[in-house]
């Protein structure tokens, strides 16, 4: 199936996109890169995602000391809190709209985040669960303070896919296990893939990501 890829600017945001050639409207999947990434960083995951989906890969809001971009202001030796992502969350909600992307079906709106992008995906989903259909957190972590948002089952019935490497030296695997536990307490249906790799996906977890999105949307 053919698709069209481009990088565009919308309301000051730089966004990579893959537009299917299938009839509109398309399910929307937003790909959120990790620290020091940009709008191209998540392309490695695109082949594993549904070919009929509109893929949107925005660039983070903040430059980092090592180049690239992030989703909150940089602080050394610091695990971000949920509210550190508030500006990014509000910005994404404002720019990712049917008006700006008329080919997208925003009733089928999913988030795929890698590392810091996974933390943003979790924060976004806990704060605005009614906007999100599915969440995939790849080599990521749950922001500090997220447990308080897990009360009252905000993610009741939401399917979430989490993958992590036991050899990850950037985000310890315990962080992913904690995320899985807390998101289950929030009501989510969590699928978890853990393999002996570093800060990346194993081949089997890549397959798991593809299988996760091949299932019917809730």
Image (cartoon, grey):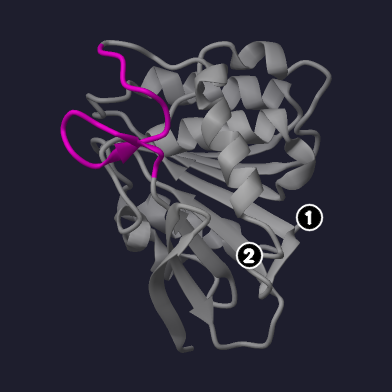
- Give the crowd class for mark 2: few <14, some 14-19, many >=20 residues within 10 Å: few
Residue 76, by quadrant, is top left
Which one is nearer the viewer's eye here, 152 or 124?
A: 124
Under circle 2, the secondary element is loop
**Quick check: is 189 in the magenta stretch?**
no
- Characterize the magenta stretch by its predominant secondary structure: loop
Q: Residues within 10 Å of mark 1 (few under 14, many from 20)?
A: few
Left or right position of 205 against 10:
left
What residue is drawn where x is 44% and y is 38%?
117
Q: Which mark is residue 32?
A: none
| Position of 129 relative to 173 (above/below) | below
Is 72 situated above or below 147? Answer: below
Which element is circle 1 on?
Answer: loop
* Disc marking residue 218: 1
Could you tell me residue 57's position as x and y percent?
Answer: 44, 57
Residue placed most toward the observer, 182 or 62:
62
Q: Position of residue 133 (x, y in %)?
A: 71, 50
Q: Which mark is residue 100?
A: 2
Q: Earlier in the sequence, mark 1 or mark 2?
A: 2
Residue at image coords 41%, 50%: 205
Q: Residue 138 sits in which quadrant?
A: top left
Which is in the foreground here, disc 1 or disc 2?
Answer: 2
Q: Which residues are magenta?
A: 60-76
């Amino acid at each position: 199936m053919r698709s069209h890829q481009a990088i565009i600017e919308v309301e000051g945001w730089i966004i990579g996109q893959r537009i299917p050639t299938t009839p509109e409207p398309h399910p929307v999947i937003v790909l959120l890169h990790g620290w020091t990434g940009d709008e191209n960083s998540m392309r490695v995951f695109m082949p594993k995602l549904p070919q009929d989906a509109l893929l949107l890969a925005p660039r983070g809001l903040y430059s980092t000391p090592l180049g690239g971009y992030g989703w909150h202001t940089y602080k050394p030796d610091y695990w971000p809190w949920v509210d550190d992502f508030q500006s990014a969350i509000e910005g994404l909600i404002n720019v990712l709209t049917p008006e700006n992307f008329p080919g997208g079906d925003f009733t089928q709106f999913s988030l795929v985040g890698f590392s810091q992008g996974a933390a943003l995906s979790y924060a976004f989903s806990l704060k605005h669960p009614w906007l999100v259909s599915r969440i995939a957190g790849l080599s990521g972590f749950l922001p500090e303070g997220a447990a308080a948002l897990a009360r009252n089952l905000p993610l009741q019935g939401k399917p979430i896919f989490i993958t992590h490497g036991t050899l990850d030296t950037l985000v310890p695997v315990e962080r992913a296990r904690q995320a899985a536990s807390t998101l289950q307490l929030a009501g989510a249906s969590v699928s978890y893939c853990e393999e002996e790799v570093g800060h990346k996906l194993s081949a089997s977890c890549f397959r798991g990501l593809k299988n996760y999105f091949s299932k019917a949307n809730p």
